[in-house]
Amino acid sequence: MNKIKLGIIGLGAIGNRMLKPIKEQYADQLEVVAVCDANETLAKEIAEEFSIPHYFKSHQELLKNAELDIVYIAVPPKYHEQVALDTIEAGVHILCEKPLANSIEEANSMLQAVENTSLIHMMNFPLNYQAQMYKMMSLIQSGYIGSIRRIDLNLHFPEWPRFWQKNSWVGKREQGGYILEVGAHWIQFIQKNFGQINFIQGEVSYPEDETLCENGVNAKLVLDNGINVYLDGISQVPGPERVELVVHGTEGSLFLENWGNLKGGKVGQPYESISTEGIHVGTLFDHLIESLRGNTANLYDFTVGYNVQVVLEAFKNPELPNGIYLVNLYK
Ligand SMILES: NC(=O)c1ccc[n+]([C@@H]2O[C@H](COP(=O)([O-])OP(=O)(O)OC[C@H]3O[C@@H](n4cnc5c(N)ncnc54)[C@H](O)[C@@H]3O)[C@@H](O)[C@H]2O)c1
């Protein structure tokens, strides 16, 4: 079977991190034929380190000169739109980093551009490929926690940007912050598993320096089934990073600690770790490869990304303290 030809656009924290597993675990299916970064020296170094035949300093050059089936877009959010539009024009499939874009207009233009094509337009929402998430949802469906009372989403960062992502934009208001960067994952997870977010109300706090991203957020997100999600976010605090989702029910609670350690407990009892042994859901790349081979797979596409963007944009809206209805904004 022919190998799928992949190009990577953006070789920073995440583009770089993805390269190793792609080269090691999927070498029999995927071939990274070209990489590209605005920092040409970096592109050259990475091409040499991973024995990648071609490197470029712009995505236009990459699309023009490399023979590709798919590109992975891993540039900062405000560049997603242009890179995606040019990739769609070139007739190449896309795996795009989240958030989909840096505004609802950009997200819409990307979605419209891809809608009438047969191209794959997958988003990198990795929570969907974790066994813990499947286990949590199956426990909820089997009645382990009874009826859902509320969901708590905690995003606590001792330092933002985190040590591994100290770049020029993720700490800035223009396109950074943890609501966009980390919240996007959980908003998608909540929308997929618990219900559409119909209404949102809350407060975002910012440091005095107007160029810097938020340092706190408190919000209530009301789902279409009446369940409330309480978001509690803060940065520049002591203690460990806490990224956790807790689903409280009438009979117990389930707790995704530190992104994905699943714990559960019955009312009044301590939490205990819950094993996910025996659950095989396939990785994001397993599903992407299946889809590129024309088989059924579990993909989260630009429409999913657009609907996450609707919620992300609400956090930037000055009407947030009064509350914003989102129902009519979804695709
Ligand atoms: N899915 C995840 O878990 C996850 C984690 C981190 C970042 N991300 C997302 O991945 C994307 C990249 O984040 P990052 O932390 O790697 O950023 P980064 O700043 O570390 O890396 C971005 C790279 O893109 C290059 N670049 C910038 N503009 C370019 C352009 N127009 N053309 C070519 N190269 C360009 C930069 O030189 C840099 O090397 C963002 O959308 C971010 O939100 C996702």
Image: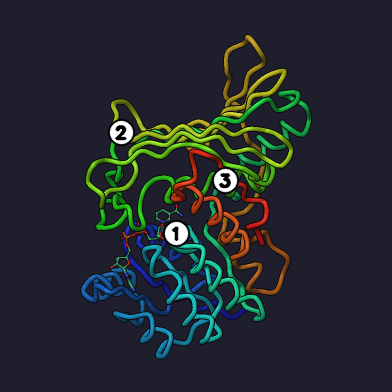
Looking at marks 1 and 3 on the same chain, the residue that comes earlier in the sequence is marked by 1
Looking at the rendering, in which quadrant would you find the C terminus?
A: bottom right
In the rendered structure, find residue 186 and report the number of the disc placed on it: none
Q: Amino acid at mark 2?
A: Pro
Residue under the point 46% across and 33% down: 218
- Residue type at mark 1 is Pro
The residue carrying mark 3 is: 324
Q: Is residue 251 left or right of residue 103?
A: right
Where residue 154 sits in the image (x, y, percent)?
47, 32
Residue 175's place in the image compared with 203, above or below, is below
Q: Is residue 287 left or right of residue 36?
A: right
Q: Name the side, left or right, on which 4 lies relative to 277.
A: left
Q: Position of residue 33 (x, y in %)?
A: 42, 79
Mark number displayed over residue 158? 2
277 and 212: which one is in front?
Answer: 212
Which residue is label 1 attached to?
21
Label 3 residue near ligand 1, CB within 8 Å: no
**Which of labels 1 and 2 is toward the front?**
2
Decide which of tag 1 and tag 2 comes sooner along the chain.
1
Q: Residue at 49% across / 83% down in the picture?
A: 68
Measure how far apart labels 3 and 2 are at the Cα level.
Answer: 30 Å
Give the Cα separation between the discs numbered 1 and 3.
41 Å
Q: Nearer the viewer, mark 1 or mark 3?
A: 3
Q: Position of residue 89 (x, y in %)?
A: 52, 86
Q: Choose mark 3 or mark 2, whichever is in front.
A: 3
